[in-house]
């Protein structure tokens, strides 16, 4: 593919990078409100249909490390364009699938393609910013990404109610195609021509190097357990709202979408605060809010049972904290080894998604009608994220 600019010849749009990154979580959350419809269409039980979400997460996890290496070897632009083309084709195929098993396969391919958005975007940011600047830029990208879980469940609920799951996958294909065109015209290559390109033999060596790096692992695990705190609830969220609170899939999509505004607020706050205050100080408060939100869900449920307010207030606190924590954690992982930014970005994302996917699967198995195991699972994930921050603080020059 013809390059429209050489490395460093133009600054990539943070908005475009945020939109490209946002399609990945968009693909997860737009399918949540239509799970019941998919189950009905294919006469499947909830445990089987849950793989529509889980396989997407594992697809992200499996592809991101490989995509990160490709970004370091071949450049950011060609890998981005190829990945989004795969996403578009797989979305159309998922809409046309004639069995649940086929849909699950195409969901995996969807994820494998779109996973390049977050990986390459973080590498592009590290190409064009210093360590502190990348933290601020990633915070703004996180704020833009935050609109994906606002819009996706609303669109998923409305489209699912009107046109079924087929219309949902066709819309994701159309969105992917539009972003692909924008990147074709406006995304320059930012990897320097003289940058040392890793060889295929370096692939596993670099990953082992990252896995043995305490700064990289600590920041990646913070991100992972933060993801886990949300996916533990999101995996059964629509069922809990309908069975316990009498709120249908359309209304659940709207409520969850509106809740995501708190994530955007946290990301904007992170971008502003990290400009004015030391990053560790900002993280101390964000991690404290994470712990409070996680255990508040358990406390409120034990004291007064399950209610809309008792559920949404702690989740809003968790979301706001995630908007602040996530960009700092991801920047910390990439900055730990900036010379292989693509590889570090891919592996850190994969670690986060694997942990999030594990919590999704665990949530599906432990939920048997009672909300308490889900509440405890959310709190455990929040606690593990806080413990990983303590690990960062014990290292020289944290964050």
Image (tube, rainbow, N blue to C red):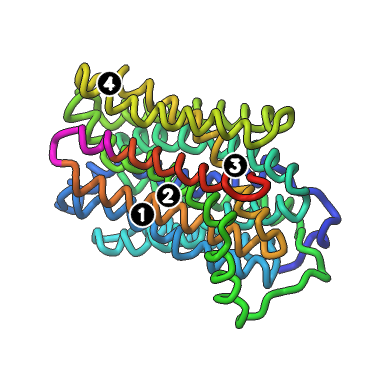
Q: Are marks 2 and 1 in contact (CB under 8 Å)?
A: yes
- Residue occupying image coordinates x 53% and y 61%: 347
**Secondary structure at numbered mark 2:** helix
First in sequence: mark 2 vs mark 4: 2
For label 1, the crowd category at 10 Å Cα-Cα, with few meaning under 14, some 14 to 19 and many 20 or more, is many
Q: Are marks 4 and 1 in contact (CB under 8 Å)?
A: no
Q: Are marks 2 and 4 in contact (CB under 8 Å)?
A: no
Nearer the viewer's eye, disc 3 or disc 1? 3
Q: Which residues are magenta?
A: 368-376
**Secondary structure at numbered mark 3:** helix
State which quadrant residue 269 falls in.
Answer: top right
Question: Residue 329, which numbered label?
Answer: none
Q: Nearer the viewer, residue 380 or 37?
A: 380
Q: Is residue 266 left or right of residue 271?
A: left
Q: Nearer the viewer, residue 363 or 336?
A: 336
First in sequence: mark 2 vs mark 1: 1
- Residue occupying image coordinates x 68% and y 46%: 397
**Secondary structure at numbered mark 1:** helix
Mark 2 = which residue? 170
| Mark 3 vs mark 1, CA separation in Å | 33 Å
Q: Are marks 3 and 4 in contact (CB under 8 Å)?
A: no
Q: Is residue 387 left or right of residue 347?
A: left
For label 4, the crowd category at 10 Å Cα-Cα, with few meaning under 14, some 14 to 19 and many 20 or more, is some
| Mark 2 vs mark 1, CA separation in Å | 6 Å
Question: Residue 327, which numbered label?
Answer: 3
Mark 1 = which residue? 95
**What is the total number of numbered labels drawn onto the structure image?**
4
| Mark 3 vs mark 2, CA separation in Å | 31 Å
Q: Position of residue 39 (x, y in %)?
A: 20, 48
């Amino acid at each position: 593919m013809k390059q429209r600019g050489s490395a460093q010849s133009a600054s990539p749009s943070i908005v475009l990078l945020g939109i490209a990154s946002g399609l990945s979580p968009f693909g997860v959350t737009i399918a949540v409100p239509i799970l019941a419809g998919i189950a009905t269409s294919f006469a499947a039980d909830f445990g089987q249909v849950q793989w529509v979400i889980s396989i997407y997460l594992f697809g992200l996890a499996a592809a991101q490390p490989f995509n990160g290496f490709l970004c370091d070897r071949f450049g950011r632009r060609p890998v981005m364009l190829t990945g989004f083309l795969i996403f578009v084709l797989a979305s159309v195929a998922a809409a046309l699938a004639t069995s649940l098993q086929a849909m699950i396969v195409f969901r995996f391919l969807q994820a494998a393609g779109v996973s390049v958005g977050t990986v390459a975007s973080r590498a592009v940011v590290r190409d064009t910013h210093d360590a502190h600047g990348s933290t601020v830029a990633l915070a703004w990208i996180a704020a833009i990404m935050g609109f994906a879980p606002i819009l996706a469940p609303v669109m998923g609920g409305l489209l699912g109610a009107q046109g079924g799951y087929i219309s949902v996958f066709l819309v994701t294909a159309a969105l992917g195609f539009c972003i692909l065109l924008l990147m074709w015209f406006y995304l320059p290559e930012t990897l320097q021509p003289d940058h040392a390109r890793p060889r295929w033999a370096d692939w596993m060596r670099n990953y082992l190097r990252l896995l043995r790096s305490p700064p990289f692992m600590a920041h990646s695990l913070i991100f992972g357990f933060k993801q886990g705190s949300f996916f533990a609830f999101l995996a059964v969220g629509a069922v809990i709202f309908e069975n316990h609170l009498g709120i249908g899939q359309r209304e659940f999509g709207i409520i969850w979408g509106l809740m995501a505004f708190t994530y955007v607020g946290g990301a904007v706050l992170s971008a502003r605060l990290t400009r004015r205050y030391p990053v560790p100080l900002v993280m101390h408060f964000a991690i404290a809010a994470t712990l409070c939100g996680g255990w508040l869900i358990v406390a409120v449920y034990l004291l007064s049972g399950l209610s809309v307010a008792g559920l949404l207030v702690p989740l809003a606190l968790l979301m706001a904290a995630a908007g602040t924590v996530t960009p700092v954690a991801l920047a910390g992982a990439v900055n730990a080894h900036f010379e292989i930014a693509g590889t570090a970005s891919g592996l850190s994302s994969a670690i986060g998604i694997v942990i999030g996917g594990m919590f999704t699967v665990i949530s599906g198995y432990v939920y048997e009608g009672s909300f308490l195991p889900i509440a405890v699972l959310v709190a455990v994930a929040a606690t593990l994220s806080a413990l990983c921050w303590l690990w960062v603080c014990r290292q020289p020059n944290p964050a």
